[in-house]
């Protein structure tokens, strides 16, 4: 079993204005309200994937109002909206649209079973029409900012945050500078190739990339016929001593370990914090396996590199969007 741990207390500025924090994932959308009194009024729903490609933006606008009601805050009092979203992003007239493999069904086609044919989902333009100040960032970057401000990456100038959840996401920081790239898509190493597997279709259209092989939504697609309808069933079987389940998990960790090794040697990182539902609920079991694929390889670049659980624990998503609108992240 995974040991219990609690996230550190997050201190917010006493003069902080009211902000809305939006966390968009491939499975759910969560919205909270934050001010000097803390984070509260959280509401969550399955991510909108039906109708036209404004459905997600309309869902968020509605949920901000619901979160305000739950927090007892007038909607008009919201000064800024921070949006931490799964990507990739597409820029259209300087505004972000989502081209997310787990939301947009038009990317990989019917093989992925998503109930729409969107190639992008409108996001920033509708939000800016509804709210005065909006900041949208990739959720890996947002979580990285939160971990550097309040979590396990405080004071570390060369680091990454990695989520192993519905999808695989990363936020990267080198020499104290967070990497974003031309469209804010730096860190999408979940769509790199680290094996020769050509049997797994990713929502982006790739076959056999990291996300297609190990993400939470890949497990039922790849191993459902073996009796593992979701990640929980796979890990339950492994803990019960199933040889086949343990072999599958060892292979998942080999893929993830190779991806992290590639990030370490490419960017000369010092520390990586890991979160996300698949990792977090089984972190004591997974972390030694993942570390084994980084430690001892090319020691000039890997010696002393730390792979650690996210300091904000299961609340990384809650604080990721908040980190976007609470001020500058320390370098």
Image (cartoon, grey):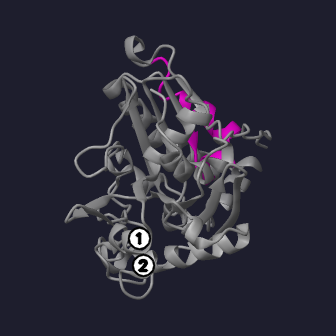
| Label at residue 77 | none
Seen in the image, is 223 located left or right of residue 228? left
List the single residue furthest toward the top: 300
Q: Residue at x 63, y 61 (%)?
A: 33
Tell me whether circle 1 and circle 2 mark residues in contact (CB < 8 Å): no
Q: Which residue is mark 1?
A: 127
Disc nearest the viewer among 1 and 2: 1
Q: Position of residue 244 (x, y in %)?
A: 61, 52
- The residue closer to the viewer here, 40 or 179, is 40
Left or right: 200 as drawn, with respect to 274: left
- Visible residue check, residue 287: yes
Q: What is the secondary structure assignment of the residue under circle 2?
A: loop
Q: Residue at x 35, y 52 (%)?
A: 209
Residue tagged by mark 2? 114
**Up/down of 189 relative to 270, above or below:** below
The span picked out in magenta is: 274-296
Q: Is residue 183 shown left or right of residue 132?
A: left
Distance from disc 1 to disc 2, alpha carbons, whole Å, reads: 24 Å
On-image quarter of the C terminus: top left
Where does the image place residue 150, in percent across and percent down from the top left? 61, 35
What is the secondary structure assignment of the residue under circle 1? helix
In the rendered view of the protein, which quadrant contains the N terminus?
A: top right
Answer with mark 1 or mark 2, whichever residue precedes in sequence. Answer: 2
Foreground pick, 78 / 180:
78
Marker count (numbered): 2
Would you say residue 250 sits in the magenta stretch?
Answer: no
What residue is at 46 percent from the left and 52 percent from the top?
Answer: 139
Instruction: Tell me if residue 278 is in the magenta stretch.
Output: yes
């Amino acid at each position: 079993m995974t040991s219990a741990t609690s996230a550190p207390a997050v201190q917010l500025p006493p003069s902080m204005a009211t902000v809305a924090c939006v966390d968009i994932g491939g499975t759910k959308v969560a919205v909270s309200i934050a001010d000097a009194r803390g984070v509260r009024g959280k509401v969550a729903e399955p991510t909108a994937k039906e109708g036209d490609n404004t459905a997600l933006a309309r869902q968020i606008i509605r949920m901000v109002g619901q979160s305000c009601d739950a927090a007892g805050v007038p909607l008009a009092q919201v000064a800024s909206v921070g949006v931490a979203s799964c990507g990739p992003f597409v820029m259209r007239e300087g505004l972000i649209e989502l081209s997310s493999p787990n939301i947009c069904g038009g990317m990989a086609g019917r093989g992925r079973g998503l109930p729409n044919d969107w190639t992008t989902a409108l996001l920033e333009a509708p939000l800016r029409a509804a709210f005065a100040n909006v900041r949208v960032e990739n959720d890996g970057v947002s979580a990285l900012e939160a971990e550097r401000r309040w979590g396990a990456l405080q004071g570390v100038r060369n680091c990454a945050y990695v989520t192993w959840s519905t999808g695989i996401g990363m936020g990267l920081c080198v020499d104290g500078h967070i990497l974003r790239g031309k469209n804010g898509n730096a860190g999408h190493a979940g769509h790199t190739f680290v094996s020769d597997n050509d049997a797994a279709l990713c929502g982006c259209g790739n076959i056999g990339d990291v996300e297609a092989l190990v993400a939470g939504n890949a497990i039922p697609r790849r191993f459902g016929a073996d009796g593992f309808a979701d990640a929980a069933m796979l890990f339950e079987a492994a803990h019960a001593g199933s040889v086949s389940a343990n072999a599958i998990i060892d292979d998942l960790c080999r893929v993830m370990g190779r991806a992290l090794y590639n990030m370490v040697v490419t960017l000369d990182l010092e520390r990586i914090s890991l979160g996300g539902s698949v990792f977090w609920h089984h972190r004591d079991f997974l972390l030694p396996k993942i570390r084994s694929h980084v430690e001892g390889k090319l020691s000039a670049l890997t010696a002393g590199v730390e792979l650690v659980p996210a300091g904000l624990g299961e609340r990384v998503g809650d604080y990721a969007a908040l980190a976007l609108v609470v001020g500058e992240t320390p370098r």
